[in-house]
Image (cartoon, rainbow, N blue to C red):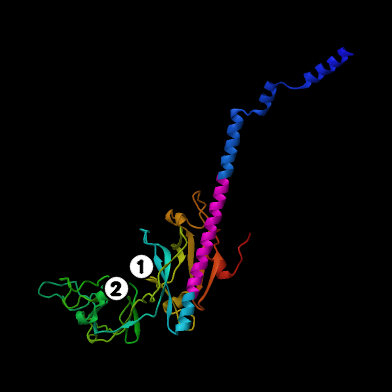
């Protein structure tokens, strides 16, 4: 009897694994640990990337909503005030290329400036000697037509430019005709410029096209364009920022990429990026003829690296949005980008919906 019980106990004891065996079964090898750690790191990286992509997409959507809201706010202000008002887009001061926008501010009605009178002049520099500064008194046809103040102390165009009220592309109105002007020959009236025929004429604007009041003769136009001195004029000054208004920044890391946007023809290099609405809620000024204005919002990293929406770039951060301004009606809308080709704004112009 005792022998049988002993045998049973011995058999039961033999089935149990040893402590060394248990340790061998529950431990991991170094290779197994490294594989597990690699998988964990990969999953973490994928999660962080997905979160960053989502956050970036949300920031771009928020920025697009912000731009749309601001433009609609400028439109409503113009209707309420019964005078032109709108929005000025501000260049990113940290962008050395000067082709991105990161802020907006509300602007008021542009003012007219008409102090003094002007003379229209086309330089004659083919035969200008020391004793005959106007050469043969026949205008050089390849020289630009200039509008010059007859009294710089009265007009003070230079001071207007220094205050940001007179900019590249401002409009000059003479006898009902409109001219865009360049400030390339506008200079400080306190500085002596010997190349100008009359030292009183340092307030100088370059006209964008042929002066409508000039006359041609068989031997060419006279350099002084006879009959064009003492003309009355009006300069459309740049709108000023409304009182108590501070610039509104776009979300951090998001900019309007001017290189890949479709901009108004009236936005000239060095000028202000203004959108003005009339009291009826439609667009005001030359921008009406453009049909569409498309502003492309993107991540600043994509902009800095020059990545386009249709680029298959390994460093491409993510999504894009277009804020579209319909210049005929003043309506503002937001659309995705068609990155399958070069017509990024097809969805905005055709009304098509982005395919999933």
Image x and y of residue 337, in percent: 54, 62
What SS does tag 1 mark?
loop
Percent x, y for residue 131? 9, 74
- Whether residue 120 is visible to the viewer of this picture, yes or no, is no
* Dot 1 crowding, Cα within 10 Å, few <14, some 14–19, many 20+: few
Q: Is residue 341 left or right of residue 87?
A: right
Q: Is residue 223 left or right of residue 347?
A: left
Q: Residue 293, how many percent across, how many down? A: 48, 70
Describe the element under mark 2 as helix, strand or loop: loop
Q: Quadrant of residue 41?
A: top right
Which mark, by number, is residue 163? 2
Neighbour tally class for label 2: few under 14, some 14-19, many 20 plus, Cα within 10 Å: few
Decide: is 225 above or below 12. below
Mark 1 or mark 2: whose residue is earlier in sequence? 2
Task: Using the rendered view, name the quadrant where residue 100 is placed.
Answer: bottom left
Q: Dominant secondary structure of the magenta stretch? A: helix
Q: Nearer the viewer, residue 190 or 42?
A: 42
Pick whichever, 311 or 210, lies toward us. Answer: 311
Query: Residue 215, image x and y in percent?
Result: 27, 84
Point out the stretch of residues depicted in magenta: 45-72
Q: Is residue 64 covered in magenta?
A: yes
Residue at 54% over, 56% down: 55
Point 46% across, 65% down: residue: 261
> 352 above or below 75?
above
Q: Which residue is mark 1?
A: 269
Residue plotted at (26% across, 84% down): 115
Query: From this viewpoint, which residue is outermost toward the front?
Result: 2
- Image quarter in which the N terminus is found: top right
């Amino acid at each position: 009897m005792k022998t049988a019980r002993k045998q049973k106990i011995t058999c039961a004891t033999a089935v149990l694994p040893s402590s060394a065996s248990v340790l061998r079964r529950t431990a991991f090898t170094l290779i197994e640990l490294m594989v597990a750690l690699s998988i964990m790191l990969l999953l973490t990286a994928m999660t962080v990337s997905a979160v960053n992509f989502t956050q970036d997409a949300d920031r771009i959507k928020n920025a697009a909503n912000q731009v749309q809201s601001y433009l609609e706010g400028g439109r409503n202000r113009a209707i309420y005030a019964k005078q032109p008002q709108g929005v000025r887009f501000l260049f990113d001061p940290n962008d050395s290329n000067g082709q991105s926008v990161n802020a907006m501010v509300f602007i008021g009605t542009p003012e007219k400036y008409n102090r003094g009178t002007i003379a229209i002049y086309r330089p004659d520099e083919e035969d200008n000697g020391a004793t005959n500064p106007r050469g043969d008194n026949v205008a050089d046809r390849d020289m630009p037509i200039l509008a010059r103040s007859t009294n710089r102390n009265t007009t003070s165009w230079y001071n207007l430019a220094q205050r940001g009220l007179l900019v590249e592309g401002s409009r000059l109105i003479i006898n009902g005709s409109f001219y865009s002007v360049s400030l390339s020959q506008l200079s400080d009236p306190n500085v002596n410029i010997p190349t100008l025929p009359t030292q009183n004429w340092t307030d100088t604007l370059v006209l964008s096209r042929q002066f409508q009041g000039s006359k041609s003769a068989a031997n060419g136009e006279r350099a002084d364009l006879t009959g064009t001195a003492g003309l009355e004029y009006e300069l459309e000054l740049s709108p000023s920022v409304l009182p108590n208004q501070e610039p509104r920044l776009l979300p951090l890391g998001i900019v309007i990429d001017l290189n890949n946007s479709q901009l108004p023809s009236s936005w000239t290099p060095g000028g202000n990026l203004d959108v003005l609405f009339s009291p009826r809620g439609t667009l005001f000024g030359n921008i009406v003829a453009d049909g569409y204005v498309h502003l492309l919002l993107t991540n600043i990293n994509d902009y800095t690296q020059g990545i386009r929406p249709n680029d298959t770039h390994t460093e491409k951060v993510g999504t894009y949005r277009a804020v579209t301004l319909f210049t005929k009606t003043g309506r503002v809308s937001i659309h995705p980008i068609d990155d399958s080709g070069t017509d990024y704004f097809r969805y905005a112009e055709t009304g098509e919906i982005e395919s999933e």
